[in-house]
Image (cartoon, helix red, strand yellow):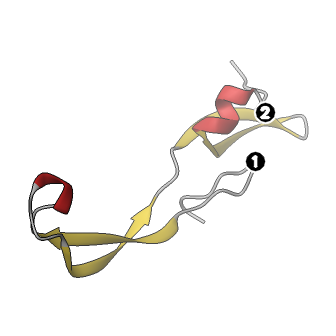
Amino acid sequence: MAKECFICGKKPVSGRSISRRGMAKSKGGVGQRVTGTTLRRFSPNIQTAHALIDGKKKKIKVCAKCLKAGKVQKTA
């Protein structure tokens, strides 16, 4: 996969973007109305890193969370 973490398997997930119009009731309006929804993707923060995998140097794609947690043994 192109955007998948080698360590935890995190990959893009699908979601929606909601468009609204109108002023909120709390601000003195008559309320907001949904005028449309579109699909969007939430992509993980994938970085390329040189790591030791089974004693060999390998170039892998890892999410930033795994890098910060120290789950990757980096090479020089």
Mark number displayed over residue 7? 1
Position in image of residue 8 (x %, y %): 74, 51
The residue nearer to you, when weighing 40 against 26, is 26
Location of residue 67 with respect to 40 vertically, above or below: above
Residue located beneath label 2 in the image: 71
Q: Tell me the quarter of the image containing the N terminus.
A: bottom right
- Sequence-wise, the earlier of marks 2 and 1 is 1
Q: Amino acid at mark 2?
A: Lys
* Residue displayed at 44% across by 71% down: 15
* Residue displayed at 17% across by 61% down: 24
Q: Amino acid at mark 1?
A: Ile
| Position of residue 39 in the picture relative to residue 25 (left or right) | right
Q: Quadrant of residue 30?
A: bottom left
Q: Residue furthest bottom?
A: 36
| Position of residue 71 in the picture relative to residue 54 (left or right) | left
Callout 2–callout 1 Cβ contact below 8 Å: yes
